[in-house]
Image (cartoon, grey):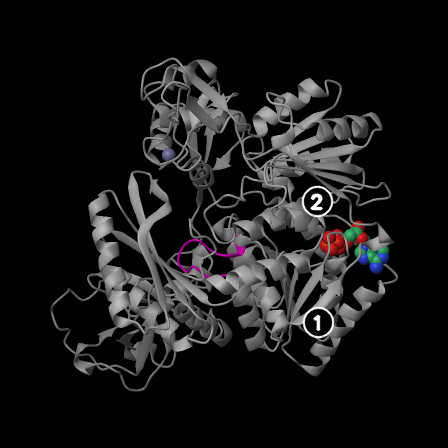
Amino acid sequence: MVPGSMRATTGELFPAPEGTPPARPACEGYASVVLNRPVRTQFTYGVPPQLAGRVRAGMRVAVPFGNRRHVGVVVGVPETPDVDPAKVRLLHEVLDEQPLVGDDLLALTRWMADEYACSWGEALHGVLPAALKRERGPARVLVVAAAPGVGPEQLAELEDRHPKQHRLLRTLLELGDEVELREVLRSLGLSESPARTLARRGLATLRRVVQRREELLTARSDRARPEQLTPDQRRAVDAVGNALAAGEATTFLLRGVTGSGKTEVYLRAIEQALERGRGAIVLVPEIALTPQTVGWFRSRFGEVAVLHSRMTDSTRLAMWQRVRAGEARVVVGARSALFAPLPDLGVVVVDEEHEPSFKQESTPRYHARDVAVRRAREAGAVCILGSATPSLESWHRAAAGDYRRLELPTRIGGAPMPPVDVVDVRAEPRGSTVFSRELRQRMESAVARGEQVILFLNRRGWAPVLWCRECKETVRCEQCDQALTFHQRLKRAVCHRCCEEVAPPAACPTCTAPALRYLGAGSERIEHELRALLPDARVLRMDSDTMRRREDYEQALDRFGRGEVDVLVGTQMIAKGLDFPRVTVVGIVSADVALHLPDFRAAERTFQLVSQVAGRAGRGELPGRIVVQTGAPEHPAIRLAAGHDFDGFCRWEDELRRELGYPPHGRLLRAVLEDEEEARVADAARDWAERLRAELPDALSVLGPAPAPIAFVRKRHRHHLLVKAPPDALEAFAAARSLLTDLAGRTSRPRATVDVDPASVL
Ligand code: ADP
Ligand code: ZN
């Protein structure tokens, strides 16, 4: 059944005009309704007689709000209103025959609203498939393509006068295929208007379609079911099985080194849940949601529902309904799959639980790992958090006994963890290439032996800095406080923050001297240098410039897997989950990119990255070797990652966090204020900080206000402040959270956001 296909209509199609007190018609009971608005309130509506008995919690309703009609979700059906009955307006329509959202998801979203400082309506809105947020059925999506016959000539005409249209058309020509408009605009940081203009000029075609091809839904890839589990896997699977049998909602932290067979533990845990008639949800980071991953689950369980944010509305809706009807008992997906309406949930798996992408960076700003733990507990289900490098938060909770620890300390087949050589780039001869002597030599001999190499650098483009030798200034984006990156293929200087680009200046924009130099290296330049170094090797670059579409990414990995590529160069896109037995050398061109970010998690992220990338080598019979280039070889994040010493790193980092009172030794709240006028931001931030300091208990510390590390984006100044609460100051934390929410709710300029447990403080 498509919710909304059967409607009960009151006949009242137009809302009561604002201000005219409605002549009170009789009403049969009331409905508490939440709306997708940042008002932390439930609204009471009367149920008109013709809808009596048809309104239940979890159904969508159309209601008058102000002088407009809104879709909301019923969260309760009180017999008496909590406001003056004379003021209660009648709801217009009930949009569902059955509750769309079960009691479990109602309770979960209510908790999320409190936890993550948003309204219940916003939390619910964030959870429903887009198609259910409107009244009518699934909207069609707009797809765009370059018009037939359009080519470089037309592109060149746009270059100088219409940079946005130029950027879009160039991308469409490169893609050569229809793409979803929303997606391409998002990746280019554009609004719809350049697309409309291109279409009007006949340079692009725009078309509405209901459904797009969804590659993931036909994914196949086999993973043989091993006859024998390793003793460590056996222990883990039994522990999960026992918890399921006993109906205990245990959370497990499964730490297993890369290649230790964590996925097999997930698969067996799900098997056990299914045997008991219970379902499973598996969350993976968006980037790891590949046909290969989905295929593993499908080859084991047949029917598997896939849910992720880039699906079209109608596909998502169809999936959602199949899950709700109990037709698919296993759900695999990115963050949002956590809210699949799966009846009788038995297992929730969060793979790569340390991944920052599990935190949503828009309202509701929830952390999917933490919500997963909550959802599993409420459902009496087992939760498995898996990673080779668990987050410090989870490590800490396991140490405190909140989570049960499961360990897979060795690789399947007993292959040793590969040795890691840390190369101090400061000791390399000056003016040499981006590759140290050691890295060069290891790559050369691996390729000569017919083995494969992975080279990692977390930075795209050719040169990340355009620097003037005369005045020592760096060329920056006019809209952001961000150095422009030179892209050789595009011949453009690009802002990686707002996506704007300009022709690279011939002279320094500050002092006009023709003395600009291109400093540093991104993946584009690495690829180039590699081709020069290894002219016979087949080199493939994977970053978001070369891999515009999901299919590109998958095809590239297939080619690498088939041995058609010798060296794979890439950004974080290649850091995860790749399992290629012929890779014997992995090089990290610079481990320092993330290390020096002004964020208290910089060391943790660097440790995780080096460990993850290092895990890509020596996965088969051939021994592997890792080369890490850095200017800070003695930094514990690097030294301990090189020694594969996870516990050592956690102890070191945990001690620092304890001293500073940062998570997991306390919780953080962050408020960010943004506006085009800096004075307005600074004043508001100061006022907020004063209010916080005056009204909050001394247990809390208020840091700031100060300009955020990323202080200027798209012409908006950003100031932030942090509230730090010790772990036991639960009430004080809640008070700070509601004060901040309150302040944010009453501010529209500057724009304000409140982030609870922020994943980044940049
Ligand atoms: P992880 O997720 O921990 O990195 P995987 O689950 O991908 O590791 O397992 C690594 C490899 O070992 C895979 O190719 C998998 O098929 C294989 N494998 C897993 N468990 C076993 C087992 N018990 N016996 C034999 N091979 C196994
Ligand atoms: Zn910019």
* Residue positioned 29% across, 83% down in the render: 28
The quarter of the image that holds ligand 2 is top left
Q: Which of marks 1 and 2 is nearer the N terminus?
A: 1
Q: What residue type is labelled 2?
A: Ala
Decide: is 337 above or below 279.
above
Left or right for 414, reference 443: right
Magenta residue span = 357-367
Decide: is 67 above or below 682.
below
| Picture coordinates of residue 567, whole percent (x, y) | 72, 30
Crowdedness near tag 1: few (<14), some (14–19) or many (≥20) residues, C-alpha within 10 Å = many
Q: Give the image quarter of residue 711.
A: top left
Decide: is 435 above or below 334.
above
Decide: is 630 above or below 668.
above
* Residue 55 in view: no
- The residue that mark 1 highlights is 273
- The residue that mark 2 highlights is 614
Left or right for 226, reference 57: right
CA gap between label 1 and label 2 equals 33 Å
Crowdedness near tag 2: few (<14), some (14–19) or many (≥20) residues, C-alpha within 10 Å = many
Looking at the rendered structure, the secondary structure element under dot 2 is helix
Which mark lies nearer to you, 1 or 2?
2
Q: Which one is in front, 341 or 542?
A: 542
Q: Which amino acid does label 1 sit on?
A: Ala
| Picture coordinates of residue 305, whole percent (x, y) | 62, 58
| Picture coordinates of residue 625, whole percent (x, y) | 77, 39
* Residue positioned 37% across, 26% down in the render: 473
